Image: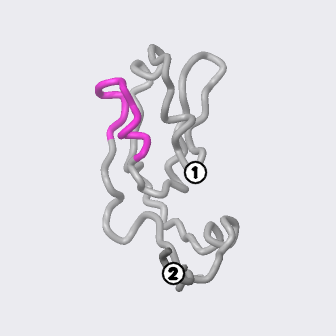
Amino acid sequence: MAAHTPNPYPEISFEARMNSAEFRVHSDAHITLDDTHCRDCTVRGCITACPADLFVPTSDGGIVFNYEQCFECGTCYLVCNEEGAITWTYPEGGHGVVFHNS
């Protein structure tokens, strides 16, 4: 039987981890949506997969994306099955999410 190795990192709640994040927002969005693709999408994986819950369906069938608190994980780009719907890049240097130690 293998010996249990203690976790070397302290337990940190999700809220505490989120409070350690700083978002340095650039005026230009690093992710853009082509709404014409989103309206025809039946999967809408970006809405359910985004860990920051930044994709919001609209009443007219579209999707609104708020890039200001994006974790830059790329999940939306990976799960999107509509070619050309999401254009994803990293934010310009000096901008984006910064995780501070907590």
Give the residues drawn in magenta, as a range. 75-87
Given the image, on which type of amino acid does mark 1 rest?
Ala
Q: Which residue is mark 2?
A: 3
Q: Residue at x 65, y 71 (%)?
A: 19
Q: Nearer the viewer, mark 1 or mark 2?
A: 2
Q: Position of residue 3 (x, y in %)?
A: 51, 81
Q: Position of residue 9 (x, y in %)?
A: 55, 82
Image position of 18 (left or right of 81): right
Q: Pick whichever, 55 or 10, lies toward us.
A: 10
- Badge 2, how many Cα within 10 Å: few under 14, some, many 20+? few
Image position of 29 (left or right of 56): left
Q: CA distance from mark 1 to mark 2?
A: 37 Å
Given the image, on which type of amino acid does mark 2 rest?
Ala
- Name the secondary structure under disc 2: loop
Q: Is residue 76 magenta?
A: yes
Q: Which residue is mark 1?
A: 52
Rendering quarter of residue 32? top left
- Badge 1, how many Cα within 10 Å: few under 14, some, many 20+? some
- Name the secondary structure under disc 1: loop
Q: Which of the marked residues, 1 or 2, is nearer the chain's N terminus?
A: 2
